[in-house]
Every structure is written in C-alpha cells, then in structure tokens.
Image (cartoon, rainbow, N blue to C red):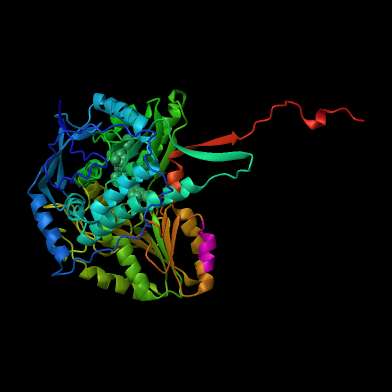
Amino acid sequence: MTTTAAPHVPHGSGAEAPMPGGSATSAPQPVPSMGGVTGFAGIRRVPAPVNEPVRGYAPGSPERAALQARLASMAAERVEIPLVIGGEHVTTGDVAQATNPCAHREVLADWHRARPEDVQRAVAAARDAHRDWANWAWEDRAAVFLRAAELLATTWRDTINAATMLGQSKTAHQAEIDSACELIDFFRFNCHFAQELYEEQPLSTPAMWNQMDYRPLEGFVYAVTPFNFTAIAGNLPASAALMGNTVVWKPASSAMPSAWQVMRLLEAAGLPPGVINFVPGDPKPISDALLAHPDLGGVHFTGSTGVFNSMWETIGRNMGRYRSYPRIVGETGGKDFILAHPSADPQALAVGMVRGAFEYQGQKCSAASRAYVPKSMWPDVRDRVVAMMRELQQGDVRDFRNFVGAVIDERSFTKISGYLDDARQNATIVQGGGADRATGWFVEPTLVETADPAYRLMCEEIFGPVLTVYAYDDAKWEETLGTIDRTSTYALTGAVFANDRRAVKQAMVALRHAAGNFYVNDKPTGAVVGQQPFGGARGSGTNDKAGSKLNLVRWVSPRAVKETFVPPTDWTYPFLGADR
Ligand code: NAD
C-alpha cells in the first residue's frame, strides 16, 4: 500500500483551490480544531438559493468551446483514482479500469479497490473527524458546500461535466442538468433547508428556555451511490456531512471518473480530512463490513430496489450489534408511467413520451417506460412518436448532434438486449429494437406495443431506452387507472396528459400512491431541486425527498434542552394540603 498526500485547502486559509485536472501532490496541512469554537457573534443567514441556470452549449458559444476542449484533454489523461481516507490518498494496487461506454476500449481511469483493512480505517477516520466536525458552527460547515457550489458553477464546471459525459455517456445537456446544475442546487438549497430546520425551536416561557439541539448522528453515515446521476453521487455524502455527520462513501464502479472529480471538488472547497472518506471497491464485502459495524449511524443509498432490500435485511440481522438504531434512507427503482386521456394533446403527449423515455438512454430512475394511450388516439400518437424517433441521432456524446448515447456497461447492454428479444417474441416492436456492441454499448431507442397490460415489459424495471405501450379502450378509462396502480411494485414517477380537468382530478385521486412525483401534462423526468422534491414510495424507496428539509431531518438526532431559570425549592404541591 502507498499513501500520498491529498490536496487539502485549509479551511479559511484563502489558499487557491487546485485547478481541476491537476495532480494531487501537496502535503496535507494540519488545521487547528474548530470544535465548539464559533469565533463569530451574530445570527448568520446563508445566501438565498436560486436554481443554477442551464447553459445551452449552442454552436459557436464560448461554453461549447470550453467543454469540447476539456473533453479532449480529459480523454487523454487516464487518471489514477485512489481511495481517500482521513484525507490521505491511498493506493492499494488492486486496480480496475473505468472505460468510456461510447467507446469501451477507451480507458479513462485506473481506480483502486478498497481492501478490508481500508474499510476499517475509513470508519476510524470518520470517527476521528466526527469529534471536531460535529461541533463546528453549522454555518462554517455550510460555507464549505456553498464554496463547492460556486467552484462547480465556475472553474470546475467543465471538468465535472466532461467526466460525466465520458464516464457515464451523457450528452452535454444531460451532463449540464445533472453534474453541474443539480449538484450546485443540492449544495446551495441544502444549506438553506438546514437553516430552516435549525430555526425550528420549541416554545418557551419567561421562566424557562426550551431549545432544540440538532445533533448529528452518533456514528458514521454509509453513503452508497448509483451510476446514473453525478448529482446524487455528490449529494448523498454531502447532505449528511452538512448536518455534522462524517461519512464513508462508496461510489458506483461504473461512474468512477465523475465521483472522483466530485471528491476532489469537495477537497478544494475546504472539506476537512475524514469528513467524507472515499472508498470505491467491491460493494458486497465493503457493505458487509460497514453494515456490521457497531458505529453505523445511517445508510444513505440510491440504487436498485434489490440491493437496498438486501442491505435492509443485513441491517435487520445485525440489529443487536448497533449502538443506535441506524437511519435507513434509500431511493430505489421505478417503472414510471405516462397515461393519456382521450382529451390529451397528441403532440404534447408524443414529445413527453420521446423525451421522457429516451433522454439519457432511459437510464433515469424517473424515465417513462410504460404508457397507456386510448385506442382512438394511438395510431396518430404512434406515428408522431415514430417520426420523432427516426430523427433521434445516436452515437458518441462528444459529437454534440447526438441525442442518445450508449448504455452504461456490458451488463446493462446484455440485460436490455434480453428484454428486446422477449419483445420480438411476445409483443410488437414498432420502432427500434437494435443493439450494437462493436465500439460502444449502443441500444437503439425502442417502442414496443403490447395487447397485455400485465406483460413483463409493462411491469419490470429495464433501465434502458425501451418504452412499452398498451392501447386501452377509450371506455375503460377508470379501469385503466386501477390497472396502472396495481401493475408495478414501484411508485416513483408518473404523468397524466389530459385537457379535461375532471380526468386530471380522477387520475390524481386514483393514482395518489402510485407515484411520489406526479406530473400533469409533462414528462415524468427532470425534477428540479427546490421545485419538485424527488422520491417515490412502495418499492421505489423511503421517499425522504433528496434536496429538501425532509431529507436533512434524517441526518440529525435532536436533543431537547429545558433550562429552568429559577428552579423550585419546595418539593410539595398545593393539592397535598388537607381539606378544611
Ligand atoms: P445498483 O443498485 O446496481 O448500484 C447502486 C449502488 O449500490 C452502487 O454503488 C453499487 O456498487 C452498490 N451495490 C451493488 N451491489 C451491492 C450490494 N450487494 N451491497 C451494497 N451495495 C451494493 O444501481 P445502479 O445501476 O447504480 O443505478 C440504477 C438504479 O438506481 C435503478 O434501479 C434506478 O431506478 C435507481 N435510482 C433511483 C433513484 C431514485 O431517486 N429513486 C435515482 C437514481 C437511480
């Protein structure tokens, strides 16, 4: 094992952040403990958050030229990604490669896998850092994340967008709305929501002062992140850390380049060593070790339902070991629907279906993957969707004309191909259906029609560019509402298209528990922090709404403090007196 120094920027030192893409060579600076010392008098307020504007990357724009230049330089870099434990960059020699899904022979990074001893060291580093970080004034913690947001909005934007495009096959627009805008929004809005939470204090009287101390959890938080959103990868460890917790973060193996850049961004923003420990590697042994640890304070997970269920079961089996009941937060899979009423606008519906199903190759947890269209509308809507699909260009995301890139990896390519084979045999492929693995993991956007509303492709999460449509009898609108509600074990997102307001109301009532994010005359994807707090119920997760106050509540363990100014000095009560 070798360890190298992390590029820490001492908090408040005014030092320049290392330039994105530079090498990590500077020595860690000892920073005096700030625990319990505020050094400031005044009630501070964080800057009011505003959603980060989305850049357009139109031909000829300066942002397009800058991003293209960063894509070219990053593709030539082949970075080495270490673990980060207590601020130390740790290389283990057990190395895996991160490749470009659009060009799978192109190696972007070599990343080191954690060994059992690294996992234990990460817990120890989190525990050591907790003593100090948990006692920082919350405004000082917020400053780290506000600075990270501003760095990401400026000098780091191209680096993190380029890493997301190359490593996860996102177009410039999909990378921009995820790894730049949404992550910036998470950092800024979480500080605002934390302030709102801390401001909530109990009633007091002149004789007593009641206070709520929003303590962080006592143990460490284990953050496990998915491949499909760089913003989620950054937010899961950061939101818990903002509330004073220390974290062991296991990023997804298939999104290492962007996860690494997010870790470096946080270091550049002044995050102290050990607050977030970056531990990539084989998920099973890492999870088994962390979920068995007595100091497990919480799990912050986003990913598939099966993995989350297995983690919850492990926690259940380990119940006797823990010092506290772990907080378990998990946002998981989806089988997201679009429902059209006969009064729907066919063009708006078709656009919602195409964008909702095929942007980012259908690899959004919110992606539309089943649609219910009245028979009277279906031929018209089908033709519109097919015409749009024929115009969608697919290929390497470095060619900005492409709307669709590759799916994430071989496993995903094989799984989706299996669903396409099934559709060829048991349904009708209306458009698409092809898959080509020669240079990248390319699966064609595919429209499937089925006469069976319980067909596999209407029920199971595929996580690829496949939309299956069931054309229902116009007279069976109400029955169809019931079918949608019962078809899937998930309840993440859903959309209704209708011009008839009574139909909207009916759908809102009948599908109340079928989606945690419900859209009226809009596609079911594209939730914005602060505007549509995100999360689903049933098999889609604990619905703790990432990027909202509801989520932050899970990372604190409040202590109610009652202070009586003049305590009683007589133990008796008036009722004890004898009747006269
Ligand atoms: P995944 O479940 O394969 O992986 C998620 C994370 O869990 C990764 O870090 C992975 O390494 C880890 N993991 C895998 N096996 C594990 C195990 N046995 N123990 C512990 N950790 C393990 O999911 P993915 O492919 O990265 O992401 C896609 C899934 O995430 C889809 O199901 C999608 O719907 C879901 N998702 C949900 C939301 C939401 O907000 N509800 C958002 C994004 C993604």
The picture quadrant where one finds residue 209 is top right
Residue 352 appears in view? yes
Secondary structure mostly taken by the magenta-highlighted segment of the chain: helix
x and y, in percent, of residue 475 in the image:
51, 71
In magenta stretch: residue 383: no
Where is the N terminus found, in terms of image quarters? top left
Q: How many marks?
A: 0
The residue depicted at 63 percent of the width and 43 percent of the height is 205
User: Which sits in the foreground, 320 or 531?
Assistant: 531
x and y, in percent, of residue 493 in the image:
41, 57
User: Which sits in the foreground, 8 or 519?
Assistant: 8
Residue 544 appears in view? no
The residue depicted at 27 percent of the width and 61 percent of the height is 359
Task: Tell which quarter ligand 1 is in.
Answer: top left
Q: Tell which residue pokes out farthest to the right in this image.
A: 580
x and y, in percent, of residue 202 in the image:
57, 44
The residue depicted at 24 percent of the width and 53 percent of the height is 152
Q: Tell which residue pokes out farthest to the left in this image.
A: 76
Identify whether 416 is placed above or below 316.
Answer: below
Where is the C terminus found, in terms of image quarters? top right
Identify whether 538 is placed above or below 350.
Answer: above
Name the side, left or right, on which 67 lies relative to 119.
Answer: left
User: Which sits in the foreground, 275 or 468?
Assistant: 275
In magenta stretch: residue 511: yes
Name the side, left or right, on which 523 lies relative to 95.
Answer: right
Identify whether 524 is placed above or below 74.
Answer: below
The picture quadrant where one finds residue 35 is top left
Q: Which residues are magenta?
A: 505-512
The picture quadrant where one finds residue 252 is top left
x and y, in percent, of residue 16 in the image:
18, 46
User: Which sits in the foreground, 400 or 121?
Assistant: 121
